Amino acid sequence: MASAPFFLLLPVALLLLVSSTLQQEEGGLDEIHTPQTYIVRVRSDLKPSVYPEVEHWYSATLRSLSSSSSAVNESPTRETYRPRALLHVYRTVFHGFSAVLSSAEADLLSSQPGVLAVFPDRRQRPHTTRSPQFLGLLSPPSRPNFLLSATDSGSSAVIAVLDTGVRPDHHSFSETGPTQMPPRWRGACEPGPSFPPTSCNKKLVGARFFSSGFLASTKNASSDVLSPIDTEGHGTHTASTAAGVPVPGASLLGVYAAGVASGVAPKARVAAYKVCWSSGCFDSDILAALDRAVDDGADVISLSVGSNPVPLHLDPIAIGAFGAAEHGVLVSASAGNGGPNEMTVTNVAPWIVTVGASTIDRRFPADVVLGDRTVLTGVSVYAADAHTGASLVGELPLVYAGNASTSRPGFRSSAHFCMRESLEPALTRGKVVLCERGGIPRVEKGLAVKEAGGAGMIVANQFLDGEGLVPDAHLLPAVNVGYSTGNIIRAYVRSTADARVRLVFRGTQVGVKPAPVVAAFSGRGPSAPSCYLIKPDVVAPGVGILAAWPLGLGPTGLPSDARRTEFNVMSGTSMACPHVSGVAALLRAAHPDWSPAAVRSAMMTTAYVTDSLGQQMLDENSGNRSTAWAHGSGHVDPEKAADPGLIYDLTADDYLSFLCSSNYTEMQIRTIARRTVNCSRNSGRMPWDLNYPSISVVLEQPKESKLQVIAHRTLTNVANGTCAYTVETRAPVGVQMSVDPQQLVFQGKRQKQGFVVNISAEGVTLPPGGWKTEFGLLSWSDGKHTVRSPIAVTWQQAF
C-alpha cells in the first residue's frame, strides 16, 4: 500500500494555479469558480496508508483544493472562497464522495489517477384497494392465494422506498402483523422535526433522510422539513402500495375507490429513505440512499424517480444499482411518464427492473353534457369534501381558456393552458373553463380557474397526449377528457355564441373491460442508451391507484386545498413501480436463494399480454395493440412468477460482458464496476448474447441484402425433478427464425441448458437515419410451465 499514489494533494495545487492563470487570461473566471455539486467516483484500493479511513483521504483532497483556490482567488469582486466539505461519502454500492466544486476543480479531479469519474449532480423527478386482487394475489372476497400464504405475506422481506419520505402515523404502517424483526436488518430511525425517535416500529423498520445534495443546490429550502417526514404525499403513497397493511374502509374523501386498502406485500417491512425535496431529487442524495439501504440490509429497493436517460457510465443511479445487484439487492425503478412517444423509457440499465404502467379494471367516469345534448365521457375523482357523494354541476356557460385571457403583458400566450393569472375573471366568472393539458400540472389549472372565479373546468388532452386519461381530485368540479373528445368540445364552443355544459360525476366503476391497458403516459422503448434491451421489462397497475396519504395534506397537494383524506388516488409509473417492488419482496421471501436476476426473470417470463377480453393488450393512447416497446414482457403475474419453471440467470460478469460488446470502453466499464475489465476476452460476443429474459437484436443494414445474427441463451431449472421443455416460436414479420435445439431436458433442479436463436432477414427500405422494429415471441413449455420471451428485431442503417 505504501507505493499507492498520494494523489490530489500537491499535484492539484500546482495544476489549479496554472489552470486558473490561463482561465484569467481567457476571461473564464465565472465559469471556473461557479460552484455546484459533483459526485466523484474513486478507486478505493489506491487509498494511501497514511489515511486510516476514506473520509480522511477525501477531506484532505478537498482541503488541498480549497487552499489552491484561495491562492488564486485575487479578484476583489469575486465572492470569498469557502472551504469545500464532503456532502456524502459512499462505501457500499459506490466508492467515492460528493462535494460542491467549481468546474475547474471537477476537471482537475477527473484527471487524477485514482479518480474514475466525476459527475455533475442531476435533478430527478418523482415519476390500492383493488390492485392486489387484480394482480391475482387475492381471491374474492379477500382470500390470500398461494404466494401470500406461502410467504406469510412477505414478512421476512424489507423494502427500501427511496422517495419523499413517509408518514409514520398512518394506519398503513401500523404494527399489526409483523412480529420479530428480520435478523439481518441494520437500519435506523433518524429523528428530526415532526419525526420523533419513536416513529418507527416493527412495520416501519427504518427511516432516514438525505438532503446534502439538495441543500447544496437550493437557495431557499425554508418549505422543506429536514427529517424523514413526508410533506408531499408521494413517498407515503408508494410505500403503502408496496407493503401497507390492510386498512378497511379506505377511500378517497369517502366517495371514490372504497374498500380495503392493502399493499402488495402487506407484511413486508418498510424502510423509508427521503431523497426528494421541494425542488426535486438529486443524484448525490439518491446515491447515498442506495448505498445506505444496501448496507442496512434491504432486500428490495423501490425507486420511483428518474430523468432523461444517459449512457450507463454517466448515470450515478445506474452505477449505484449495479453495486446493489452485486450485493444481491433487487432494484425496481419506474419507466418514466414520457409516453406515448417511443424512446422515452428511463432507468434502463440491464440490472434494474424497469416498470411501466397499465390500467386495472376500475375507473372513475364523469360525463361532459354539452348544451346540444351531446354526452361525452371523461374521468374525475372530484369531491367537494369528505362523504359528499358524487357531485352534479348544473348547466353553466362554457368558455375556451384561450378566449378568456387577461390583457396583462406576458400572460396572454399561456391562457389556453390555464396558468395562474393568465385568465380574465370577467370572462370566466361563474363559467366552466375548457383548458388545454400541458404547461403546468393539471391540478394547478384548477387552482387558476378557481382564482379567476370559474365554476368548473374541463382539461382536454392535446395531440401528443392522445386518448390516455388519468383522474384528478381537482379543487373545483372538473373532468379530464381525451384528445378526440376535446376536439368535439372545441368545435362546439366555436359553433355557438351561447355554449353551455353540465358535468356529471359517476363515482367508481369496477369490472371494466378490457383491462389491463398500457397507460398512455408510460415510458416507451427502445432504450436510448441501448437498443439491445427491451425496456420496460414489465408493466403493472399505475392508473387510478388508491393508497395512503398524509392527513395534513389535501389530495391535490396544493397549499390552498383544505380538504383532508387518509387515502388518495394517484397515477404514474411511480405507482406501478412499488407494485413490482412488492411482488419482488414476495418472491425473495418465497425463494431466498434466488438472485435479483432470477427474480426479474420469473416476473418477465410469466408475464401476460392478453387482456380480460382474451385479446392482445391495447395501448391506451391509440386504441391499437400494444407492442413490447410499451409493455415489455407483459403484465406482471405474481402467482405464476412464484413457480416459473425455468429462469434466465445473470451474474455481474455477464453484465460487464454486455457492456464490452455494447462498445463501452474498459475505462467506462471500470467506472461502473470498480474493477479492471479486459474486453478482449469478450471477442465474438454480441450485445444480444446477454442472458436476458427478452431478446432484442439489431440488423445493421449494409448493401448486402441478407442479414443474419445468432443470439445465445441459457436456462436454469428451478423446479424439482426431471422435466422436458419444447420450444414454440412466432417470428417477427419479415424474419426467418429457428431455435437449436428445439427440446431441452433437465435432470434436476439448478441444472442449466443452453440454446441458440438463429435470426435472418432481408433488408428493408428505411428512411435516412431511420429504423424499423418487428416483434415476435419465443416460449418454452413442459405442459405445466410456459417460459415466454418477447423478441424485437430492429433494422437500422449501418454507419
Image (spheres, helix red, strand yellow):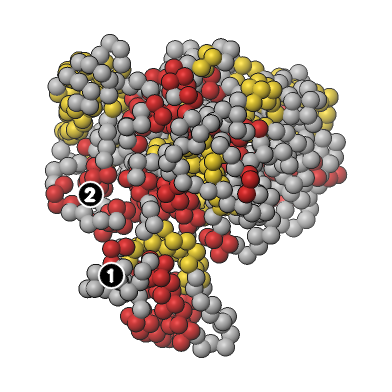
408, above or below 241, in the image: below
For residue 748, what is the image quadrant? Answer: top left
Residue 140: image location, x then y, percent: 56, 12
Q: CA distance from mark 1 to mark 2?
A: 22 Å
Residue 270: image location, x then y, percent: 53, 38
Q: Horizontally, is 224 left or right of 477 in the view? A: left
Question: In what element is the residue under mark 2?
Answer: helix
Q: Horizontally, is 698 left or right of 628 in the view? A: left
Q: Nearer the viewer, residue 410 or 339?
A: 339
At x 41%, y 54%, the residue is 316
Q: Which mark is residue 113?
A: 1
Q: Which mark is residue 660?
A: 2
At x 22%, y 73%, the residue is 3
Which amino acid lies under the numbered mark 2 shown in the image of this protein?
Answer: Cys
For label 2, count other residues whose C-alpha is less than 10 Å away and answer few (under 14), some (14-19) or many (20+).
Answer: many
Which amino acid lies under the numbered mark 1 shown in the image of this protein?
Answer: Pro
Give the position of the N terminus as an image quadrant.
bottom left
Q: Nearer the viewer, residue 69 or 698?
A: 69
For residue 675, what is the image quadrant? Answer: bottom left
